[in-house]
Image (spheres, grey):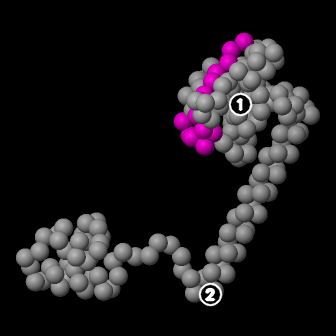
Amino acid sequence: MANIGYARVSTTDQTHALQTDALNAAGCSRIFQDTISGAKFERKGLESLLEYAREGDTVVVWRLDRLGRSLKDLIEIVQALEARSIGFRSLTESIDTTTPGGKLIFHVFGALAEFEREIIKQRVNAGLASARERGRIGGRPKAATPAKITAVEAMRAAGGSSVDEICKAVGISRATYFRVPR
């Protein structure tokens, strides 16, 4: 049963020193690090930490935002740790899922995040319904308009033009050209 630290900074201009000092003071026997934006999906240090951690260990971070890209991501990571009987501690926010109070706080965060996702989904659906009522369909405009299809068909029938010449003249891509029915 060990405390395992995770430190992440977003750019090479930043240093891990503040985080690693705090993690060492918290008794972490090993610290994994990443120098990458939290928005990136592939974080080698975090992946190594998750492989290294064993049942009974506690993953420690300096601050919650160092671990997850979003609240949803953070909750998923902590739930995955919990499923493997691995605790989680955030030093700055004083959250410790190895205690009943820490679990409660973390589950409240999870419930709030789920509530927020549902509210956003409702707003998006209401906005889409309102736009449809005003006649807006949405999505990307079609590249192959009826006028462009007619032009492609006419140039094909006339012959003498290559695919690239037709695409350039009509203003479409090769992929769009080949989607125009023959």
Residue 31 sits above or below residue 158 on the image: above
Give the quadrant of the C terminus: bottom left
Taking the magenta stretch, the answer to whether it contains residue 55 is no
Taking the magenta stretch, the answer to whether it contains residue 38 is yes
* Residue at the disc numbered 2: 134
Please give the label number shown on residue 122.
none
Crowding at dot 1, Cα within 10 Å, few <14 / some 14-19 / many 20+, comes out as many
Crowding at dot 2, Cα within 10 Å, few <14 / some 14-19 / many 20+, comes out as few
What separation in Å lies between label 2 and label 1 (alpha carbons)? 47 Å
Residue 73 sits above or below residue 127 on the image: above
Q: Amino acid at mark 2?
A: Arg
Position of residue 160 measured from the top left corner of the image (x, y, whole percent):
7, 76
- For the point 67% across and 71% down, the residue is 125
Q: Amino acid at mark 1?
A: Leu
Q: Is residue 88 visible?
A: no
The image quadrant of residue 21 is top right
Residue situated furthest front in the rendering: 13
For the residue pair 25 and 84, the one nearer the viewer reads as 25
- For the point 30% across and 86% down, the residue is 147
Residue situated furthest right in the rendering: 101
* Residue at the disc numbered 1: 81
Position of residue 124 measured from the top left corner of the image (x, y, whole percent):
67, 69
- For the point 60% across and 43% down, the residue is 39
Q: Earlier in the sequence, mark 2 or mark 1?
A: 1
Give the quadrant of the N terminus: top right
Position of residue 169 measured from the top left corner of the image (x, y, whole percent):
22, 76
Position of residue 104 measured from the top left corner of the image (x, y, whole percent):
89, 39
Question: Which stretch appears magenta?
Answer: 29-42
For the residue pair 137 and 87, the one nearer the viewer reads as 137
